[in-house]
Image: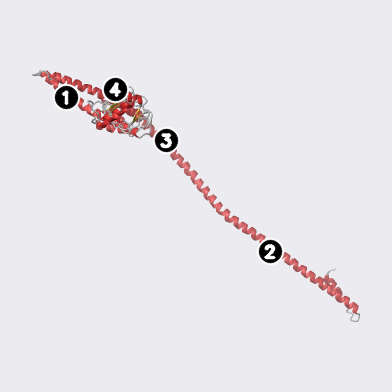
Amino acid sequence: MEIQSLKNAILDQPLDLVNFENNSKYLNTWKTILEVEKLESEESKNKIEIQKTQYEIENIEYQKRNDRLKFWVGIIAPLVSAMALMATLLFQIITSNRISGRQAAAEENQRISDQRQRDAEEDLQWRNFTSTLNDAGKRGLEGAFQLSSFYNSDRYKNQARSLTFVFLQGVTEFQIFNQLLYRIVPKVDSINYSDLVSLSSSLNDITTAENSEIANGKYLLKELQKFYPPDPNFLIQIIEVKSKLSKDEHNLIESSKELQLVGKRIAEFMKLGQVANLNLQNAHFFKTDFSDADFKNSNLSNVRFENCNIKNANLSNAQSFQGSEWDGTKWWQANQIERGLLKYLIDYYSLDKGISYHEEINVDDVSQFLKWKKIL
């Protein structure tokens, strides 16, 4: 029975004020009803509290979900924006690359076409030049200057430089020779030094021939001048011989300067001390300064040291020296000398006061020479 129905039932019963026992039951019943109502009230209150707590929990959960959503929205939104921006940039880059690629391809095709045109023109110039090599004039100064236009060519520079070394032998003016040589060999290294060695050998042949021509000219002039009074025909011949002799003497002076220049550049390279096993075979060094140079395992076969300075040079490692010439060179001023070479020098190139050296003979020269001689 519900509490309200029970209360109504009790209220419908009359109150018996005489019967105390019934009244006591009546009161106890009401007391019980009140306690039940109190319990129901508390239960209802508890339910409300529980509902309130559940609502608060749900509210907290909702707030947490909302906070998490705000958190991820705060992260994802910039990412989405960044990705959209990246996608836009990527699209622009791809589009730009496609355009640039087409432009680059067009430019490359144009470059190739231009290069082919330049190569064709260069080929024609080279063929035209080589077709004139039989012309003696082209093999001298004119040819050397024409070859200089090919020094920057990727395809012909090596051939041009090699040919220029040949043509340099026909250049009789030292200043022009000097300019051309520095254009061909701006810096001497372990590869091109051999070209200078070959050039010095060729210049040696030229100076030898010029000396011979001068000697012959002087002899002929002396013979012609024996006739007095001279025959008119002899006078003309004397003038011609004198003119040629003057030209030959000028050429010899210029060739000697060229020989000195080539030797100087080789010596400067050797003094760097960066290479060994140099092959100097057949080279001609004229008044070259080899002071403090190190001939590390160098081949000196048939090398001509004419009036050279080798003070404090190291000749201890010379590998070969047969046929070498040391006229006018104070070899005893060297710091070290290989024993076989020392014997060769003492046997064939002893100190001789009648010979013209690059410096006058003094007391120190005699002392140094005797010191080396005692070693043997």
In percent of width and height, residue 146 lies at 29, 30
Is disc 2 in contact with disc 4, using a CB cutoff of under 8 Å? no
Query: Residue 56's mark?
Result: 2
Q: Quadrant of the N terminus?
A: bottom right
Query: Residue 348's mark?
Result: 4
Category of crowding for the residue at label 1, using alpha-carbon neighbours closer than 10 angstroms: few (below 14), some (14–19), many (at least 20): few
Secondary structure under the numbered disc 3 in the rendered image: helix
Is residue 184 among the parts visible in the rendering?
no
Secondary structure under the numbered disc 4 in the rendered image: helix
Is disc 4 in contact with disc 3, using a CB cutoff of under 8 Å? no
Measure the alpha-carbon separation of dots 2 and 3.
76 Å
Nearest to viewer (mark 1 / mark 2): 1
Query: Considering depth in this image, is 130 or 237 the residue closer to the camera?
Result: 237
Judge whether 93 appears above or below 303 on screen. Answer: below
Category of crowding for the residue at label 2, using alpha-carbon neighbours closer than 10 angstroms: few (below 14), some (14–19), many (at least 20): few
Amino acid type at circle 1 is Ser
Query: Considering depth in this image, is 363 or 245 the residue closer to the camera?
Result: 363
Judge whether 7 appears above or below 145 on screen. Answer: below
